[in-house]
Amino acid sequence: MENAQLIRNQPEEVKALQDTIYVIGGKWKLPIINSICNGNKRFREIERSIPGITTRMLSRELKEMEMNKLIKRTVYPDSPVLVEYESTPYCKTFGNIILAMIEWGKEHKKYIQEEA
Amino acid sequence: MENAQLIRNQPEEVKALQDTIYVIGGKWKLPIINSICNGNKRFREIERSIPGITTRMLSRELKEMEMNKLIKRTVYPDSPVLVEYESTPYCKTFGNIILAMIEWGKEHKKYIQEEA
DNA sequence: GTAGTTGGTATACTCTGTGATACTGATTAC
DNA sequence: GTAATCAGTATCACAGAGTATACCAACTAC
């Protein structure tokens, strides 16, 4: 019925793709991961590094990502309380995806500019 | 103020990332692109290849992606009308992202299974 | 004093992405 | 006849993603 020779293990790949989309879907998770991986540690620092995000969304996403072990939150309870976020090794496995997407975004910009 | 030596061109990268998310965001665009790039051409064929998608979502996404020149729609108006979708070269530039995400999804599955 | 920073929470609201279901007209297969 | 396939469209409905805005307590700087 199908051209079996063309087809890789499609169902498995589709599922893997959908799983990934489920974990990093939405507008903010990848930018947050990227920001933290780039060295931003403090809440306001991360916030400032991502244009358009609100404290509420950042707060929510950070919580969710902490639960999913993508990031680690550390509180230093010295006189002015200090909070730091770090990426876990697991989080860093998104590196390739993020790089590929940044690359695509840059190419896309060129493409749009050439068209106009 | 900042450790300039650590930082790449962050603002530009964040924007590129956000642009990409804007274009391929949502639950279905990447699975659809992947399906078409894997050789599926007909509406029902694509539909069957993506578990969980409804005709409505597929229809909407295909339209949007056609407008964005990511895919090409061809109608062969012979006795039973035939419609075929193809990926454009531009669409194929998502290849790396999709592969990276499939890879991540597979690793993620292992990771989950080891934990449990 | 006043203004600003930090790390958030609270409340209210919008909106759109997604889902569920049914249906169409043409055609083919039994 | 009946059922099925093809390529979709039409409605309705909803959760939850995302936005806007204000606010808090503790602290620093001027």
Image: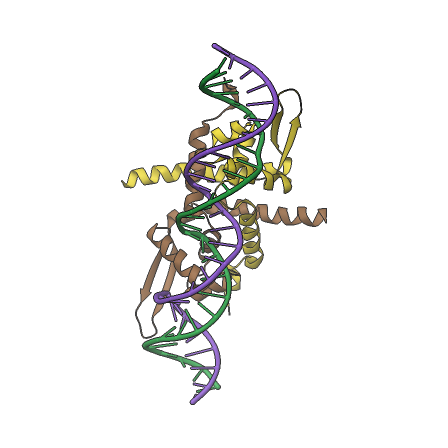
Chain colours: A yellow, B brown, C green, D purple
- Placement of A61 over or under A16, stated as above or below: above
Q: Is residue C23 left or right of residue A61?
A: left
Q: Is residue B71 visible?
A: no
Query: Depth check: B7 or A46 in front?
Result: A46
- The single residue placed furthest to the left in the displayed view is A116
Residue at the image position 35 percent from the left and 68 percent from the top: B82
Q: Position of residue A98 (x, y in %)?
A: 51, 38
Q: Measuring from the top left, give residue D6's x and y in whole percent.
A: 41, 70
Q: Is residue A36 visible?
A: yes
Taking the spot 32% from the left edge, 75% from the top edge, the residue there is B79
Q: Provide residue A14's location: percent of width, then percent of height.
A: 54, 55
| Front-most of residues A49 and D16 | D16
In which quadrant of the rendered view does residue A51 lie?
Answer: top left
Q: Residue at x 46, y 65 (%)?
A: B45
Side of A85 relative to B57 (left or right): right
Horizontal side of residue B23 vs A6, given as left or right: left
Q: How many marks?
A: 0
Q: Residue at point 67% right, 24% down?
A: A77
Percent from the top left, x then y, of residue B8? 48, 26
Left or right: residue B90 compared with residue B38: left
